[in-house]
Image (cartoon, helix red, strand yellow):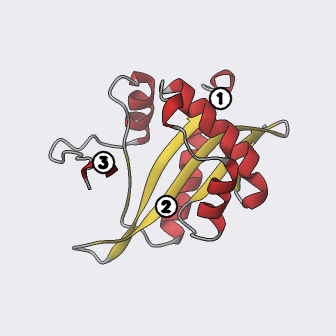
Amino acid sequence: MITVKHCTAEDIPDIYRLMKGLAEFEKMSDALTIDEKGLERLMTEEKAFEALLAYEDGKAVGLALYYFYMLSTFSGRRVLYLEDIFVDEEYRKKGTGRLLMQELINEARARGCIKMEWKCLKWNENAVRFYEKLGAEISPDWLTFTLKEDKF
């Protein structure tokens, strides 16, 4: 049985382990420069993100890391932004991702959000299909731009 819980600082080791798994999956291990202490500071002192963990048999097997935009300009309502979602490979196709997404949907509703947004790598076809099955749509009108710190 899979369960989902909202994280606290006590969950940082599991969050970090799953973040490392995500970095490896996305072939971006060198981009993971934060450590557990920095992650805890972001979560507790700065309240920069919230997280959900999915558990099976007491082991953390899935992670959803998210935060809230202050508002959507035209509606004046919040937007839940899903920064990352990841499920350990051996626990995929068991409904873990769906449970994490459902809890995020519940959270968005409870906080009065107008929508949820996230990004997905083009090559991750399994994720794209998963999101489409949920009813999510790829926005054809919006481009994502990134300005990295070396350009500031």
Residue lying furthest right in this view? 58
Q: Residues within 10 Å of mark 3 (few under 14, many from 20)?
A: few
Q: Residues within 10 Å of mark 1 (few under 14, many from 20)?
A: some
Is there a contact, CB below 8 Å, between mark 1 and mark 2?
A: no
Which residue has dot 3 on it? 150
Q: Is residue 110 above or below residue 140?
A: below
Is there a contact, CB below 8 Å, between mark 1 and mark 3?
A: no
Q: In the rendered structure, which amino acid carries the disc numbered 3?
A: Asp
Q: Earlier in the sequence, mark 3 or mark 2?
A: 2
Residue lying furthest left in this view? 141
- Label 3 to label 2: alpha-carbon separation: 25 Å
Q: What secondary structure is marked by label 2?
A: strand
The one nearer the camera, 141 or 103, is: 141
Q: Earlier in the sequence, mark 1 or mark 2?
A: 2
Image location (x, y in percent) of residue 15: 67, 46
Q: Earlier in the sequence, mark 1 or mark 3?
A: 1
Image location (x, y in percent) of residue 44: 66, 67
Q: In the rendered structure, which amino acid carries the disc numbered 1?
A: Asp
Which residue has dot 1 on it? 88
Image location (x, y in percent) of residue 120: 38, 36
- Label 1 to label 3: alpha-carbon separation: 33 Å
Q: Residue at x 40, y 28 (%)?
A: 129
Is there a contact, CB below 8 Å, between mark 3 and mark 2?
A: no
Residue lying furthest bottom in this view? 76
**Quadrant of image for the C terminus:** bottom left
Left or right for 146, reference 39: left
Which residue has dot 2 on it? 67
Q: Is residue 24 above or below residue 84?
A: above
